[in-house]
Image (spheres, rainbow, N blue to C red):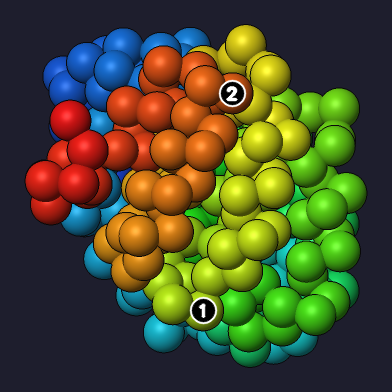
Amino acid sequence: MTPAARVTWARAALIPHARPAKAPEMAAYLKTDEPMLGVAAADRRVVGKALLKAAPLADAVDYRATIEALWAEPEREFRYLAVQLAHGAKAHVTVAHLPFYRELVVRAAWWDLVDELAAHVISPLRRRDRARVTPVMDAWLKDDCLWVRRVAVLSQLKHKAETDAAWLFAACLDRAHEPDFFIRKAIGWALRDYSWAAPEPVQAFLARHGDALSGLSRREAGKRLRALGRVG
C-alpha cells in the first residue's frame, strides 16, 4: 500500500467514528484552530493499530513518507495517527530518524503532539540506545525551539531506575531560568516521573536546588513526594 493509499484507508476508517458536534469542543480544549473530525482518542488508536496491521511499513523511506502523508491532511486526527505510526512501527524507530523527529516536534509546536513524540518515540529510543541519543538530547536542550527543549527535558520518561539522574538534574537546572510555562511544567513532570522510582534523590535535589526552580516546577516535582509524606 502506498502512503497516499494509507491516508485514504485511514480517512475511510476514521469517518464512522467522527462526531462533528464534538469537534469544536475538542478543538477548544486543545486551543487549536485546526479542523477536527471529532474522533475520540480511543477510536483513533484502534484505527491506527488496524492501519499498521493492514499495511505494514516496508522500509525507512515508506515510514517517513507515510508519516508525512498523514501529517499533511487538514484534520488534526491525522497528525495523531502520524505520531502513532511513528512509534508503532518500532522497527523503524532509529537514531537515524532523530533529525526527522525533531522536524515533527517543530512542526507540531503544541503540547499534545509534542508530548506524544517525547513519551512514545524519543524516550523509548533513548532508553534503547542511550549512548547515541544522549548527545543529541544535549544539543536539543539548547535548541532555539522551546518544544525541542521540552522534549529533551522529557526524554527519560518511564526510564525508572535506568534514568540517568545526573543528566536529568543537570538538564532541569540548565532550563530552570526559562519563563515559559511549558518548559517549567516539563521540568516538574520529569522530576515527578523519576520520583516514582527514586524518591530520595528527587527529594534531595529539591532540598538543595529548589530555590532555583519555578514554583510550578517545584509543585509538579513534589506531587509524588507529598503523597509519600516526604515534603509538605
Q: Which residue is mark 1?
A: 162
Q: Nearer the viewer, residue 123 or 89?
A: 123
Q: Which dot, 1 or 2, sits closer to the camera?
A: 2
- Residue 84 seen by the camera: no
Q: Which mark is residue 206?
A: none
Q: In the image, is 41 to the left or to the right of 3?
A: left
Identified at 59% across, 23% down, the residue is 212
Q: Nearer the viewer, residue 122 or 186?
A: 186
Identified at 17% across, 30% down, the residue is 232
Identified at 62% across, 11% down, the residue is 179
> How many other residues sit within 10 Å of disc 1, few (<14), some (14-19) or many (≥20)?
few
Dividing the picture into quarters, in which one does residue 15 lie? top left
Q: Nearer the viewer, residue 196 or 230?
A: 230
What is the count of numbered marks?
2
Q: Which residue is mark 2?
A: 212
Q: In the image, is 177 to the left or to the right of 158?
A: right
Q: Position of residue 193 (x, y in %)?
A: 37, 54
- Residue 90 seen by the camera: yes
Mark 1 residue element: helix
Give the Cα separation between the discs numbered 1 and 2.
Answer: 25 Å
Q: Position of residue 95 (x, y in %)?
A: 80, 75
Q: Nearer the viewer, residue 113 or 183?
A: 183
Query: Tag 2 or tag 1, which sits nearer the N-term?
Result: 1
> Mark 2 and mark 1 in contact (Cβ < 8 Å)?
no
> How many other residues sit within 10 Å of disc 2, few (<14), some (14-19) or many (≥20)?
some
Identified at 48% across, 29% down, the residue is 210
- For badge 1, the amino acid type reads Glu
| Quadrant holding the N terminus | bottom right
- For badge 2, the amino acid type reads Ala
Mark 2 residue element: helix
Q: Position of residue 5 (x, y in %)?
A: 59, 65
The image shows residue 181, relative to residue 18, as above or below, that is above
